[in-house]
Image (cartoon, rainbow, N blue to C red):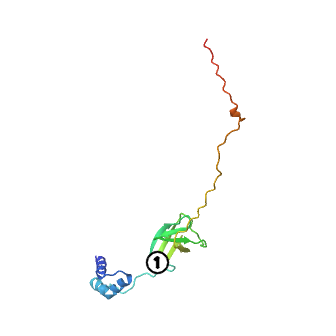
């Protein structure tokens, strides 16, 4: 219920950016929210678990989508094109799925089999070089010479047997 109120209050204040939203929260919205809904804990013991070693929270709290690698080792995401570089230890094959992550700091990451893949962002799609088809010489239909065996064939009259 109150989450909907936050959106409406921000709209009324004319807030459009993340910085303006954070300033709005600090000005008093959070204080009002805490006064209305805060509940004192039964115990003062912090029961949160520590973050396991090797876990990067930035890769968990991010925008993430699965994409398919094109035949030219490019990946498209949000109208952007990423070219996977050949020097990767594990190169994802064409037509396989990779995970594209945009972390909250704005950095982009492509992950294949839990390993980050090196890439280069392309400004535009490379132009395909089309090789002209190998032209065959204009062929003329085969015309057999006058002494060809099928020209030597003569039609003989058919002999019909007389009825007895």
Which quarter of the picture shows residue 104?
A: bottom left
Q: Is residue 75 above or below residue 149?
A: below
Considering depth in this image, is 135 or 2 the residue closer to the camera? 135
What x and y, as percent, mark residue 50? 45, 82
Q: Is residue 82 above or below residue 149?
A: below
Q: Which image quarter holds the C terminus?
A: top right
Q: Which residue is mark 1?
A: 103
Q: Is residue 118 left or right of residue 50?
A: right
Considering depth in this image, is 160 or 30 the residue closer to the camera? 160
Residue ranking furthest to the top: 164
Which residue is at a point 38% across and 84% down the rendered structure image? 19
Considering depth in this image, is 159 or 137 the residue closer to the camera? 137
Residue ranking furthest to the bottom: 27
Residue 117 in view here: no
Residue ranking furthest to the right: 147
Which quarter of the picture shows residue 128?
A: bottom right
Q: Is residue 91 left or right of residue 46?
A: right
What x and y, as percent, mark residue 111? 52, 72
Residue 103 in view here: yes
What x and y, as percent, mark residue 89? 60, 72
């Amino acid at each position: 219920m109150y989450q909907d109120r936050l959106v409406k209050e921000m709209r009324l204040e004319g807030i459009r950016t993340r910085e303006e939203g954070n300033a709005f929260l600090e000005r008093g919205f959070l204080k009002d929210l805490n006064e209305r809904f805060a509940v004192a804990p039964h115990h003062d013991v912090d029961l949160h678990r520590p973050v396991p070693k090797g876990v990067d929270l930035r890769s968990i709290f991010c925008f993430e989508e699965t994409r398919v690698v094109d035949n030219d080792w490019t990946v498209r995401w949000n109208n952007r094109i990423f070219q996977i570089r050949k020097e990767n230890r594990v190169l994802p094959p064409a037509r396989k799925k990779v995970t594209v992550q945009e972390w909250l700091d704005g950095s982009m990451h492509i992950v294949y089999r839990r390993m980050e893949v090196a890439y280069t962002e392309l400004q535009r799609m490379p132009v395909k070089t089309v090789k002209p088809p190998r032209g065959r010489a204009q062929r003329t239909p085969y015309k057999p010479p006058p002494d060809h065996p099928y020209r030597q064939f003569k039609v003989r009259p058919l002999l019909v047997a007389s009825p007895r």
